[in-house]
Amino acid sequence: MELAFLNPLVERPGPWASVYFDTSRASQTAAAEQRLAAREARDELARQGADERTCRVLHEALAALPRSGAPGQALFATGGEIVLSVALGEPPPAGPEVSWSALPHLGPLLEHRREDPSCLIAYIDRTGADFELRDDYGHSSAGGLQGSQQWPMHRTGSADWSERHFQFAVENTWEHNAGEVAAALREAWQETGAEMLLLVGDARERHAVRDRLAEPLRSAVVEAEHGSRASGSRTGQLDVEIARARAEYVHEHTAETLDRFRAGRAQAAGSAVHDAAEGVPALVEAAREHRIGALI
């Protein structure tokens, strides 16, 4: 698990209120149920010894959490201030989990926060592309592009000189539009913060766009064998392919992280700086020095 988002929690001395909250209710009484659960969480924090300001600010935040989007939320507060709020991939199974302790209670976060990578998908044809972002909480439009050159896009089989000249113009149009799609993808990649890039469309169109992407973006590309930009072509086969690609990314990323950890452990014992840390004291020290890149 990438841990940079936890940095705010190691910069404060605590004590900490940690709450894992269910926001998945969709019934007609959901709002009332959420207010009741928020009060119960506040009362439990007070029973465990949390100060009034921290109890109050958490109660207000929990009661106001939206019930659309992420099915759960983790909140961490100290000194009457919410320091971090993290969306969860699944709700806590037994209702709100509440803790008041010297350190933030992070165990449930590892269990309930999904690690599937966000994926930017480009549906490409010879005239442009549509972009979509998929993450743990659904999918949304991420823009797109209609190529600036709009010659007829289909070649013929004629060998006539004028036809060959026309075919050459069509080829140039394809190449030009592929370059524009690649440039738009670079911008969308930076804006969305996606970890993967999936190209959907005819093989030639996918290759033309991929060849115009620079590293490291090109290395993040996966090409899908199903689907296209055309309406109605985004089938279940494509969804399966996307899910498989995201799972493979997680597997490869985990393997790379383990390799780095093993290499760090193999450093000489006398080294002043280590790339890996084991045990709670070493992890706390590394966190306070902002040296944790991933947690295994």
Image: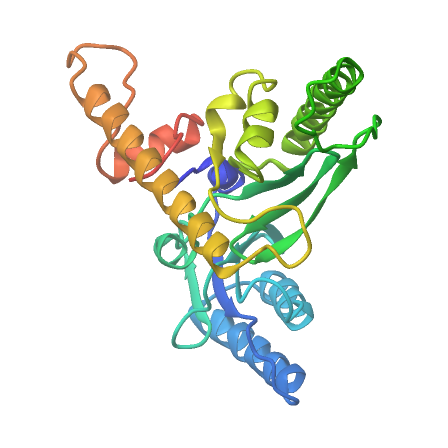
Work out whether 197 lies above or below 61: above
Which quarter of the image is occupied by the N terminus? top left
Front position in the image: 212 or 192: 212
Residue 193 location, quadrant: top right
Task: Locate residue 178 relative to residue 75 in the image: left or right.
Answer: right
**Does residue 12 appear anywhere in the picture?**
no
- Taking the spot 74% from the left edge, 39% from the top edge, the residue there is 144
* Residue 38, x across and y down, in percent: 58, 75
Work out whether 29 lies above or below 153: below
Which quarter of the image is occupied by the C terminus? top left
* Residue 98, x across and y down, in percent: 44, 67
- Taking the spot 46% from the left edge, 48% from the top edge, the residue there is 242
Front position in the image: 280 or 142: 142
Work out whether 95 lies above or below 218: below
- Taking the spot 65% from the left edge, 38% from the top edge, the residue there is 124
* Residue 188, x across and y down, in percent: 68, 33
Front position in the image: 225 or 111: 225
Task: Locate residue 22 relative to residue 231 in the image: left or right.
Answer: left
**Does residue 176 appear anywhere in the picture?**
yes
Work out whether 161 lies above or below 66: above
* Residue 262, x across and y down, in percent: 19, 25
Colour basis: rainbow
Task: Locate residue 128 relative to residue 119 in the image: left or right.
Answer: right
Residue 292 location, quadrant: top left
- Taking the spot 61% from the left edge, 53% from the top edge, the residue there is 82
Question: What count of labels does the image hold?
Answer: 0
